Amino acid sequence: MTALTIGILLIVALVFLVLIGMEIAIALFVVAFAGVWIIRDNFELAMRLLSITAYNGIADYLFATIPLFVLMGLLVSISNIGRDTFEVAEELLRRLAGGLGVATVAANTVFAAVTGVSIASAAVFTRVAVPEMRRHGYSAGFAAGTVAGSSVLGMLIPPSLLLIIYGVLAEVSIGGMFIAGVIPGLMLALGFVAMIILLARYRPNFVFDDPELVRMRGVAQIGNRMTGREMAVKLVPILLLVVLVLGGLYSGFFTPTEAGGIGAFGALVIALARRKLNRQRIWEVLSQTGMVSVGILILLIAAGFYSRMLSVAGIPNAIGDLVRMGGLSPYAFLLLYVVLLLLLGMILDSSSILLIMVPIAAPIAQTMGFDLIHFGIVTVIAVEIGLLTPPFGISVFTVHNTLDDPSVSVESIFLGTLPYILVMLVSLIAIAVFPTLTLALL
């Protein structure tokens, strides 16, 4: 067998190992090691390449962004900033048709700008927003679907762990990825808001259990329940943190790593000021930061080893040659790539898809003339749709498990996320066709 044939068989083996439940990092290590050993028929070379990858894979100042942003997100979560943001948005938007749904999206957008983890957003707003929406007559499926759907903003609006992982795998600027994610993230948020308002007006039975009762309650509510001072007290901490981190990053005053450090320090100050930290919580936050960060860093080392195996097998060049000989245009290749990502999203988690696909696809995309930053935003949006699609739908299951309500089925939540998936698909097409939507701020 040729090296190319062996490489393709190993990719199939990798997907199989992940599907039967093997941890993605272990599967990557096993497949990469076996690939180098078989292709070069040299066990010592495989061991040497593994040791070099393990040492050099994350021996860079840039990788400190991962634990710092994880720490910032955890500190923000325990400070109840997500709840406060939702309460202010609820107060400002309660007279609007579908106002609580819009408030959930608005709060998630702000929360995403300081956490960067979709699952964290889903867990926080399930506890905060779903009970409030249910109390105001929203259907259980739509309320839970709104939380799951808007939680994907956490992986696109910077800082985002997926953007960091893609930047490392594709060897592009993480700061550039963050800046490129701003306009697409805001597009998605505005698309979600427009969709909720339109559904509340023209398809109220999909949004509410009893639309007429909800309308009557809305008319009956007059006057503010929260003063401007109270709203300011709740919003100022997170707005200052967003301005500090993103303002410093986009102005070029901070590097991504420095922005992570400043953000983590700011989140620590907020948590201490709100008296949300004690000895036990500090230990829990540090332990979770360590576990999440080490997990991601090991994945990146494994992905680096896997990428080197692909290079040894010549897979990226071979697939690129096949694409060109097949007469596929760049956008035909992009379409096939996105469809593959959407299919993989039904069975694999976001990180696994990136780790498997980006080392193969990014070199091909670059040779076909795509800007890798634009290609990365398209990739992340396509992968994020997988968080909402059955049967895997990790955001949906996170909401369902956090809600822990037997009356709310997983199927009803998947149905509630359908409008959000449609908005994401439309945004994905627009961003793929018009690269300036991602590159305008660079």
Image (spheres, rainbow, N blue to C red):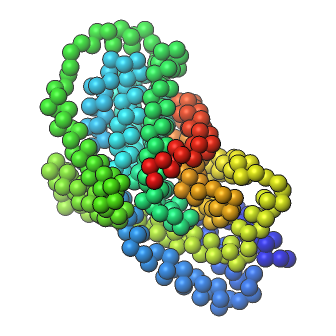
Q: Residue at x 35, y 44 (%)?
A: 111
Q: Residue furthest bottom?
A: 44
What residue lies at 56% left-to-right and 52% top-to-bottom?
Answer: 374
Q: How many marks?
A: 0
Task: From the top left corner, tell me how far across and down residue 148 is, in percent.
Answer: 47, 38
Where 301 sits versus 222, above or below?
below
Q: Residue at x 66, y 58 (%)?
A: 369
Q: Residue at point 65% right, 79% down?
A: 33
Residue 187 visible within the image: yes
Residue 370: x and y in percent read: 63, 56
The spot of residue 436 in percent (x, y) is 54, 46
Q: Position of residue 140 (x, y in %)?
A: 46, 27
Q: Classify 167 as above or below 228.
A: below
| Along the line of sight, the residue nearer the viewer: 337 or 267 | 337
Q: Quadrant of the N terminus?
A: bottom right
Is any part of residue 414 visible from this angle? no
Q: Looking at the image, which is closer to me, 283 or 306?
A: 306
